Image (tube, rainbow, N blue to C red):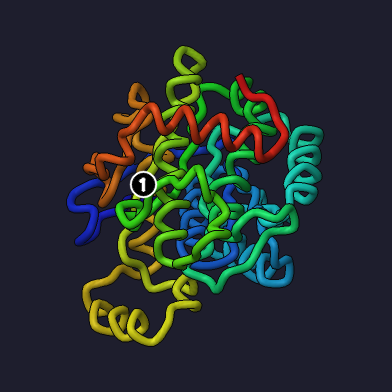
Amino acid sequence: MHSIRNFFCGPWSSTVRLEGKTVLITGANTGIGKETARDLARRGARVIMACRDLEKAEGAQKEIIQDSGNQEVVVKKLDLSDTKSIREFAEQVNKEEKQVNILINNAGIMMCPYSKTADGFEMQFGVNHLGHFLLTHLLIDLVKRSAPARIINVSSMAHSWGRIQLEDINSEKSYDSGRAYGQSKLANILFTRRLAEKLQGTGVTVYSLHPGVVQTELGRHLGGPMQLAMKVVKPFSKTSVQGALTSIYCAVAPELEKESGGYYSDCAPASCSRAAKDDEMAKKLWDSSCQMLGISWE
């Protein structure tokens, strides 16, 4: 039985098995996504690794299969910066998979230079929020049919750096990479709250989380001062294995079965910013996201 016990998550451990369940994880070829995939594969789940870089993903897939002894680890191509790719991916999953019991919206980019997605959205907001919003919308019927099911959105304490700027959502008037990242992570939490409300009574629960300050490739775009700051905090930061624990907790902890819409850190409920509890803004963001993506999601 696989148990987890470490400095950051205190005494939490779980021997939950996932045979007969299907887990879908975005950005599962590196960092905390990869370690989440490894853990859930060890628990016996069928794991779908949704990744943009297939070569890297196939390397991670081989490693996870070897490590877990679980052959049910598959790779599928997904580029969250392109709605055409998201639609093709979702169509394939809906056609080929009979269930998705756990959807982990994990992939993300952080503080990159200004650029736009294939559809003209600011890259961080487009990938971190809109890409996962569309993916979840396209898979929601399958997830509902798989209930009891869980949806997990990996946010960050950086959500407190941002505010939702509906009047300049794509940062075209002014761009600050940290604020734009904060906006995208705040959007993850607001999306979680609104989605939890909409899914009441369906058997599908939703969670958002801060994985911790983790040593991953996510910080590759950080400038000089931030790189220096990261070096200073490195001794106090988490490894990818430790960083994945709260995602795993939200995916399997039996005590969360009746909880939905909350924000977690270090395998426990955590407090988020006041802006992250603004249900009025959560509604506006939901409507705006639907409009930007040209979808209707009642």
Q: Nearer the viewer, residue 96 or 229?
A: 229
Query: Left or right of 172: which side holds 252?
Result: left
Q: Nearer the viewer, residue 18 or 201?
A: 201
Q: Nearer the viewer, residue 97 or 124?
A: 124
Q: Residue at x 24, y 77 (%)?
A: 233
Q: Give SS at disc 1.
A: strand
Task: Using the image, determine if residue 214 lies above or below residue 122.
Answer: below
At which x and y percent is residue 106? 51, 52
**Label 1, on which residue?**
209
Q: Is residue 284 visible?
A: yes
At which x and y percent is residue 275? 31, 41
Q: Residue at x 57, y 49 (%)?
A: 25
Badge 1 crowding class, 10 Å Cα cut-off, few under 14, some 14 to 19, many 20 or more, is many
Q: Residue at x 24, y 46 (%)?
A: 12
State the quadrant of the C terminus. top right
Task: Using the image, determine if residue 234 lies above or below residue 35.
Answer: below
Q: Residue at x 77, y 51 (%)?
A: 85
- The single residue placed furthest to the top in the displayed view is 201
Q: Is residue 41 visible?
A: no
Identity, as a three-letter code, of the amino acid under mark 1 = Leu
Task: Using the image, determine if residue 224 lies above or below residue 297.
Answer: below
- The single residue placed furthest to the front in the displayed view is 173
Query: Left or right of 80: which side holds 42?
Result: left
